[in-house]
Amino acid sequence: MIQHLVNVSGGKDSTAVYLRAMESGRTFRAVMADTGNEHEMTLEYVARLHERTGGPRVEIVRADFTRQLAQHREYLLREWPKQGIPEAIVQRAAELHEPTGNPFLDLCISKGRFPSRMAQFCTEELKTIPITTGPVAEMLTAGPVLQWLGIRAEESRNRAKQPLFNRHESGSMVWRPIFSWSVEDVWAQHRRHGLAPNPLYALGMGRVGCMPCINCRKDELRGIADQFPEHIDRIREWEQTLAEANKRGSATFFPAVTDPTDVDRPGTYSRIDTLVEWSRTSRGGRQFDLFFQQQGGGGCTSDLGLCEREAA
Ligand code: SF4
């Protein structure tokens, strides 16, 4: 018998799929990967989804990078001294390779960098792998699995090219049951079930998920900084931790360069506070503008589409 698994993110599309699964009358499980960079309202929304709908409780999975951190610590203790890196820097970096328990931060420390649009390892490592090696693998031992995904064709050109059904490399099948839905269909689904959407939408967030997402746009960054400054504080702390945990001595959440004509810091990346300050201005800033114009507004590259795109 086919087992059904609904992937939930706390966003409107995956919630609509969860409700669709309830309407189908089938028995199903639901899962969310907590990246460690989620907004607390999203975690609360998902934790209470079953109470508000009568559906199944959403299981939470979190990636664990204990092994990768230990491997990288061993590597840096062995190799960095040979590269002439001062002992104090090596020891401090080694100390910071103890697991913090936060998947996002631990992943970045083990990689020595933050993810970026060009190196978007976060979706795979923080969402796809823990879900497929956790609940999906466990369910596959009992028989075939169908994963239900909240992907809609109108979200992006890339998503529009995805099939309705396909086999995933995990061995499960995946289905996009709201593929042809409009965003209005999604909101109507919430209304039909009397379910209020994630409150972050009413607070002006176009997309829920990582706060901030590495793909966020200028206005999204400003909205987060204005309403949830504690999330910017966390990113600032992570930048500092990561800077001390890698041999470059620097790390920035966004790879947005300062103006290359800046004679004091030519071609360097800017930390979160500089970008937040800039996001509050109508000032151009050629390099920042170029960087943020190319941002996709959220969204992941995996075929499981586990990160929400900015609302249409
Ligand atoms: S793409 Fe964005 S939302 Fe998805 S895991 Fe990366 S930072 Fe988080």
Image (cartoon, helix red, strand yellow):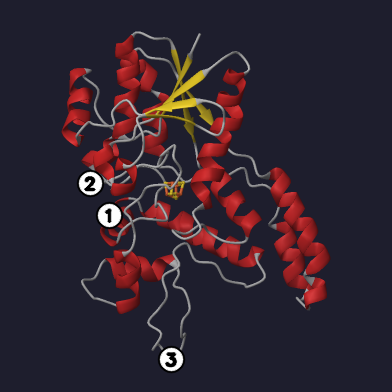
Q: CA distance from mark 2 to mark 1?
A: 7 Å
Residue 167 screen position, x and y as percent? 48, 29
The residue tagged 3 is: 263
Please identify the residue farthest to the bottom as the structure is shown.
263
Of the image marks 3 and 2, the number of the one nearer the N terminus: 2
- Circle 3/circle 1 CB separation < 8 Å: no
Q: Is residue 98 visible?
A: no
What element does badge 3 sit on?
A: loop
Picture quadrant where residue 226 is located: bottom left
The residue tagged 2 is: 204
Q: Amino acid at mark 1?
A: Gly
Of the image marks 2 and 1, the number of the one nearer the N terminus: 2
- Circle 2/circle 1 CB separation < 8 Å: yes
Picture quadrant where residue 280 is located: bottom left
Q: Residues within 10 Å of mark 1 (few under 14, many from 20)?
A: some
What element does badge 1 sit on?
A: helix
Of residues 61 and 302, the one drawn nearer to the viewer in this rendering: 302
Q: Residues within 10 Å of mark 3 (few under 14, many from 20)?
A: few
* Residue at 32% from the left image edge and 71% from the top image edge: 290
* Residue at 57% from the left image edge and 14% from the top image edge: 143
- Circle 3/circle 2 CB separation < 8 Å: no
Screen quadrant of the C terminus: top left
